Amino acid sequence: MTKGNPQEYVKQLKEEVNDIELSDHELDDDKHTELLSSIGVNVDVDKKHKNKQVRTEASRDVSVFSLLGASGDGTQKKVNLNQLLKGVKESANVNVLKKQLSRVNRPQRHLEAPLPKPVAERLQRKVEYQKTSEKLAKWDPVVQSHRKADHISFPLTQPPLYIKTVDKQLSRKGKKLTPLEEEIYALLRGNKCVERPDHDLTLQEEEILASVSLEEAQERRAELQKHRALMSYHESKSKRQKKIKSKKYHRMLRKRKMKEDATKEDDDEAEDAVKRAERMRAEERASLRHRTGSKWARSRAIMAKHDKDSKELLNEQLQKHRELVTKPLPDSVESDDGVDTNVNANGEDNLYSSENFEIASSNPWLRTNVENKNGKQIVENGGDPVGNKETASDNNEEHKMDSECENESNLDEPKQKLRKWLSSEDTDLDVSKHALDISSSDAMVKFKEAYDKLQHEISSEKKTAPDRAENVFQDLKEETIEEDKEMQDGLNEQCNNAEYDVTVRSQPLQILSRSSGESKSMKVDTDATKSFSSATKVSEQEAEFVAEEDLEMGSEARQQMTIEQAFADDDVVAEFAKSKREIVEEGKPKVVSLALPGWGEWGGVGINPSKRKRRRFRVKPVPMKPRLDQKLGHVIINEKRDVHIAKHQVNDIPFPYTNKEQFERTVAQPIGSTWNTQSAFNSFVKPKVDTVMGSIIPPMNSDEALGELKKASKWKEDRKKLKRKHEHKNKLEKLKMFL
Amino acid sequence: MKVKVLSRNPDDYVRETKRDIHRVFRNYDPALHPFEAPREYTRALNAVKLDRVFAKPFIASLDGHRDGVCCMCKSKQKLNSLFSGSCDGELRQWNLTNRHCIRAVQAHTGFVRGLSCSHDGRVVVSVGDDKTIKYWTTDALSEDRDKPINTIVAKSLYTGVDHHWSEATFATCGQTVDIWNDERSEPVRSYRWGTDSVNSVRFNPVEANLCISTISDRSIVLYDIRAAVPLNKVVLKMKSNVVAWNPMEAFVFTAANEDHNLYTFDMRNLNFAMNVHTDHADAVLDVDYAPTGKEFVSGSYDRYLLSGSDETNVRIWKARASEKLGTLTPREQTAARYNLKLREKFAYHPQIKRISRHRHVPKSIYNTLKEKRTMKEAQRKKTQNLRTHSKPGAVPHVAERAKHIVSNTDANEANE
């Protein structure tokens, strides 16, 4: 019974122990505690119990306060009815009793007290607000797409336009048709001429289309067109003729008509007429009848001076001759001639062009024209050395300064070369590595590191041994070119070799750099600015020396050094000085030589104007005002700034743009139709929001919005499909190419 | 030898009729046009100047009211129909096309406080100082046009009314926000949060069951008419007069505030205004969105951007002052579009910015604005000085968009 509930078991044990205590007090305490602990009872609690009041004998007046729990104090739980039942011996009624008790002991289901109204409302509000906020999220994509859209036209959904046909109206349900309507409907029902809602053409039209072929139809159409044109021409002509008031004209017209009718009546006659005309022509050509050689003609010619009529007569006769002799030429003759001439022309053209070409290549004058730009450059170069000398003589001091600078740049050269070469080398290696072996990556890294070191060292010792560095560098370059070639065979081996080579070669350099480092660090104290520039290229070895000497230097110098270290990578002072020098140089007026080649002497390719001439046409610059920043060491004042233009210029980069170039590019891109094609212009000036005049723009509708989204997604899918198709096609084409 | 001659097809360059424009042939090679950008800049400058020259926004005045116009509403189904209520209780219907008053009714004794047109455009509801709600037909030709269709005598005074956008339901505001149905003479539901009176109420045009109201205790409250309680509340530093919903973005509204600013909110995040619109010289009295949801118009005592009503007149203004009215020829249209784009493109250039912002305003407004600017600058300087001379972090940077918001309900409840 008690096995299921250990607490109760313990409780019972305690009771038993208490009983024992009462009987024999003399029991040893230690043993007692041992016993208790073996059972698992807390000894401290039991000690307290000792002092508690215990009822030992029955008495009449029982204090209410001493009636506590089963153990006699408030710490224990109250006695359960179940516990009491344990003592009852098994009987038929016990089980029923137990069931009833368990029902009583079940946890009670009662309603909790309602929350105070404000609290409840607050909760309700919170829930409702959250719900609506979540619901509103469905609008997000629509709103975003509208905000981002380049162009929106309102109203968002324009109602579809359709025409209500009689057919549709008649077929409406629920209403009785009038007899007339019924009749009309019956007529329309099976008719082939009735327009159908979902087709462009009626049945009849389709049938006609099916029956006639396209060519036939076109022919017929052309014929009809021609006929119509003729009709209209005739109509207009007769109208015009009708308007003419002259009686004589009409008489003549009538006669001509009669003649035409007559000729039409008799075709044989017409044929005869043609034959007669041919004969007459032949006779005319054979004889001199209508020429000026006859006696009558000659006399007329004499008389013509005095008499107008005779002259006219003579002219008439000549005209008659011309008319008789002339014969209408058929078209074919003309076209033949044309072909001939064309051929000729082409031949000539070719000749001309080829000659031209030859002339262009052989004629030095023309060549100079062709190579105009090059010539100019040559002239400039020719002029330069003299000019250089001149300037050198003018300001010797500055030249010296420059030479120093140049030295520096010269020193930089090998470094740059190395860098360039290294980068190219790197890429080469990378590519080949990828192709051949990936395992060589470790070797590659080492290889690179070694080169980097070498690069550092070369830069550090450039002042003492630039030539040597260059030599070494060139050796290396040659070496590695060879390596590159061999790389094709086996990369791994080669990489190792290279590494070995580099390490071997770098040893003497290290020694050199050590010495140079010493000399440099000594300079630090003497010249601050120089050290600043030199400190940028301090190698690792140098750094050690510097650290040693750092202790000896004062705090100021140390600070200087920290600044130098901070700006180790960018040489600010020297850079600024250099840029200022450049600007000053640029602003200085220059000597211009206006000597033109070929004037007063021979000119052409390879011939420069003579020295005398160059000196003669040299324009000396007018001395300018001293620059505003001449005496200000670390200031550059821009003297080119125009206040009037600055008024129109933007000072800060406006919001959507992140850098200057971006903004400048957008401003430089014109949108006007002067510089763009019409279609591009139209797309540029299309307004963001377009509204249809006179239409109500209803607020957004959820169905429409959802539909729009669906459409958009469908469009995307279609595009994807197209893309896939396109890719597939491309692949196929490539395959074909290979095959 | 044959001489070759350049020949052109006359169809390419001869005009078809005398009225045609001469065709101009262009070479678009950018190398041939080195001065594109400066030329376009000049064009932009001209465009912006012309824009100011032709800025004549006033179209017409609807004259007829004998007292100040208190409220207006436009029909949701007709473009040319407008209703206005005046301080002497008169309700007028206007035809905007020919600018005539179609009818005038003495609707209330005292002010007409609010007007609203139903979603189907058949009924106009007016509330007045006489504690009545009256239904009017919009049909100016019907027989009972001088009598209200229905009159409801309310218990308290109403200050505004607005219609649901898709149902025959409307909301009034006063002591409480009441939701009314056409079939009942009692409010279907009423909301109250706090003790102060409600100034205005507006329904959301997209999510039609949401509505919003401004309360005299400086707060803006959101409601869902299906729920038993209001949704949320945001308290600004000063009272908001009116709120307008964006008709294209369901969760965006703009509040016209007494502190001369307008605040645009996303109703899901009330701790932070989406945008603050400044430049009024006095309290902003009214705000309404364009149906495209891209622009809104606001009115104030300073009549600076006013587009509604004042004194005894209702005035019609152009939204774009320099726009030409009536149909445009295609060439005019393209030119206008090009000019607009140029102004947009060069908007950041100082001269163009200056000219486009220039307005001839009454002296008092000009001076007030200037004064405001000075005050703002002084304030900014002061905070800057404070910040520099105090412990770092003691004077925190507060975004302008969060500065004017006193509290949101969530924050309030945390304090309680």
Image (cartoon, coloured by chain):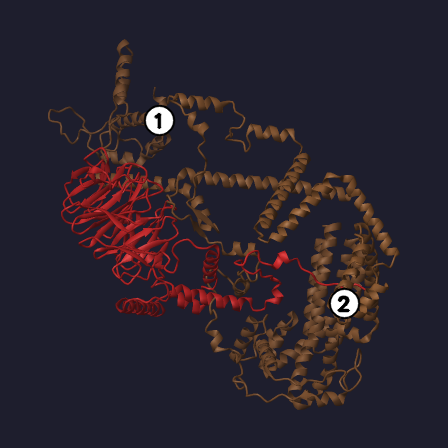
Badge number at residue A193:
none
Please name whichever residue, B258 or A313, is drawn nearer the observer in this view of the structure. A313
Q: Colour of chain A?
A: brown
* Residue shown at the point (38%, 42%) measured from the top left: A136
Image coordinates of residue A71 in percent, x first then y, are 24, 29
Residue behind mark 1 = A6
Going by the numbered disc 2, the residue's amino acid type is Arg
Nearer the observer, disc 2 or disc 1? 2
Image coordinates of residue A225 in percent, x first then y, are 63, 41
Residue behind mark 2 = A505
**Dot 1 alpha-carbon crowd within 10 angstroms: few under 14, some 14 to 19, many 20 or more:** few
Q: Colour of chain B?
A: red
Residue at the right extreme of this rendering? A286
Please name whichever residue, B172 or A541, is drawn nearer the observer in this view of the structure. B172
Separation of disc 2 and disc 1 at Cα? 87 Å
Q: Does A646 sit above or below residue B132?
A: below
Residue at the left extreme of this rendering? A61
* Residue shown at the point (17%, 40%) measured from the top left: B147
Verify CB contact (< 8 Å) between mark 2 and mark 1. no
Q: Secondary structure at mark 2?
A: helix
Residue A357 in view here = no
Going by the numbered disc 1, the residue's amino acid type is Pro
